[in-house]
Amino acid sequence: MRVTQKRPMLTLSLFAVFFVVAAVLGPFVGSQEITIADLVRGEGTTQFFIFWTLRVPRLLLGLLAGASLALAGLSFQTLFRNPLATPFTLGVSSGAAFGVAVAVLLNLGGYMFGIEVTPLFALLGAVLVIMILMRLSRTDAGLSTRDLLLAGVALSYFFSALLLFGQYLADFTQTFRMVRWLMGRLETIGYGPTLMILPAFVYGFLTLLLHRREMDLLLAGEEIALSRGVGVDSLRRQLYISASLLTATTVAACGPIGFVGLVVPHILRLLLGVTHGPLIVGSLLFGGPFLVTCDALARNVIPGAELPVGIVTAILGGPFFLWLLMQRRK
Amino acid sequence: MGKLLSIENVRWRAGGKEILRGVSFDMDLHQFVTVIGPNGAGKSTLIKQIAGVLPMQEGDIRLRGRSVRELEGRERARIVAYVPQTRDPDIPFTPRELVEQARYPYLGAFGKLSQSDRRLVDQAIALTRAGSFVDQPFGTLSGGEQQKVLIAAAIAQDTPLILLDEPTTFLDPSVQDEVYELLRQIRAERRVSILVVTHDLNRAILSTDRMIALRAGEIVRSGAPAEIAREDVLREVFGSEFLTIDHPTSGHPMILPRGES
C-alpha cells in the first residue's frame, strides 16, 4: 500500500487551473446576463456597473473567504490534533453573531468610523471571544490547548444562548436580519468586506507558510516537535492567532459560512497527503474557487431566488465529504 | 568545548512532589550509558529535560559546555536527539516523512531539504533496515517497525548524543535484540553517545559501559555493569531480592528473579 505517494505538484497545478477558471468565469454568473461586449462598451451601462461593483467584489470576497476558512480549519485541526476542529469550534463565529445581534437590536445601521456597522460589530464580538480564550487558556506551562478547546466550546454555547436571547427580544424584522446573517453569504457592494479580510489573510497565509515544517512536527506529536527544536508554545500561539483572525474577519464580512473550513482541509489531505506545505498552498488554490463555485450554484439552483451560499456549502459539502471518505476506504 | 553532557544538581518538582533531588553526572563522546531504577524514580523526567521536552527548574544541564537554558531549540536539537517512549499510532505521516522531519534543526529559511539532508535520511533508513516499509502509514506498522522508524529519525537528526526512553518496552525478544544491536552499531559506526532509560537490566548489562541507578530522584549507584549487577546493590535500588548468575558465554553477571525457594 503506497497511499501517501501523492504528487502534490501535479494536483496543485490542477487547483491553479480551477482557480483561474473560477476567477474568470465567476463574475459572468448571475441573473443579469453580462457579455464581454458589454464590458468593452465601457462605463455608464448597467452591465458595467453590476460587473465591477457587484460581481467582481463578490468573486474576490468568495476567493478570499474560501481560502481563509480552509486555512483556519487546517490550522485548528493541526493545533488541536483533531480532525473535527473547524474555524467555528471555538465560538469565534458565535461571538460574531452576538455582535451582530447587538447591532441589530440597537437598530444601528450604516457606517461607524467609515466601516459598515454590522461587520464591525461582528468583528468586535469575534475578537472579544478570541481575547477571552487567550486569557482563559494561559497557564504557567504556556498555552493549554486542552483548556482552549474546552473553554472555546463552552463559550460557543454561551454566546449562542445570548444570540437566542437577543432573538427573543427582537421583533420580526430584526430576527429576520439576524437569521439572514447567520446563513452566511457573499453578497457585497464594493470592495469594503474584501479589504477587511485581505490583511488578515496575507498575515495568516504567510505565517502558516513560514511555519509549515513546525506544523508537520506538531502533528507528529508534542514530544517529537520539542525534541527536534520546535518552540511549541510560540507555534501554538501563532497558529491560534492566525486561525482566529482568519475566522474573525471572514465571519465579520460574510457571516458564518459553514462546512468549508471542515471539508476543504480534508479534501486537500485526501488529494495532497498530510504535509502542510502543499496543504497551505492548496487551501488558497482550492478553497477559494471551491467557495466561488458553491456560490455560483447557490445563485442558480432555484431560478429567481439567490440562496445564501452557506446553505449550499453545507448541503453539498456534507455528502461529498462522506463520498470521499468511502472512496478512500476501498 | 566542555563535556558532551554534564548534568549539574538537577531538581524537578511536580504537583508538590520532588521527582528529582539533585542529580549530577557527566557523559563523554562515544559512551553507552543506561539509567535504571524503579518506576517513579525520575528516569524519564531526567531524560526529557535533557531532550528539551520538559523545561528546567533547578540545577543545570550543559551540552558541549553550554547550558540548555541558553541554547535555542534548534541548536540543542543539533546536539541531542530523543526517541520517546510513547509510540502514537495516530501519527499520520509515513516513516520517510517522519525521518525527513528530523532534519528540521538544520533547515534554512525556506525550509527546503538539501541533497545532503536527503542523503542522511536515506542512510538512516538503510542503517535501521526500514526500507521495506518506509512508505506505509506509520500507524499500520508493528511496534518493532515503529521503533526502528523513530530510531532512524534520531539517527537522521545527526547528533553526537541520542537519548532513548524505554526503547524495548512492548517489543518481542528478538526485536529487543535487534534494537540493542542497532544501538551498538550506530555507536560504533557513527561514534555517537547513547543514553538509554530502561527496565531491561540484562540487555543494559550486556551492551553498556556504565549504568546509573536512580531511586526516589537520587543517584544511588553508578558504575560499570559488574558493579551494579550485584545482589546487594539491586536490593538497595529496587528494594527487593534478585539472584545473579554469570552469562554462559560473555561472562557478564545476569539478573534473575528470585523464584520460589
Image (cartoon, coloured by chain):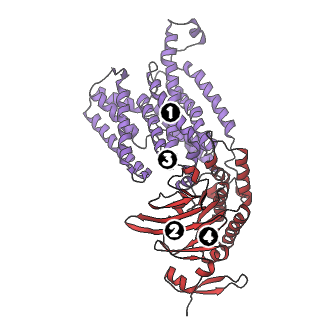
Chain colours: A purple, B red
Q: Which residue is mark 2?
A: B24
Amino acid at the residue labelled 2: Ser
Residue A245 picture quarter? top left
Amino acid at the residue labelled 1: Tyr
The percent position of residue A282, horizontal first and vertical second, equals 60, 36
Query: Is A231 placed left or right of B79 in the picture?
Result: left
Amino acid at the residue labelled 3: Leu
Which chain letter matches label 3? Answer: A
Measure the alpha-carbon separation of dots 4 and 2. 14 Å
Q: Residues within 10 Å of mark 1 (few under 14, many from 20)?
A: few
Query: Is B9 placed left or right of B30 in the picture?
Result: left
Q: For numbered disc 3, what is the local secondary structure? A: helix
Mark 4 or 2, which is nearer the eye? 2
Measure the alpha-carbon separation of dots 3 and 2. 36 Å
Do labels 3 and 4 touch, CB within 8 Å?
Answer: no
Q: Nearer the viewer, residue B11 or A243?
A: B11
Q: Residue furthest left?
A: A169
Measure the alpha-carbon separation of dots 4 and 1. 47 Å
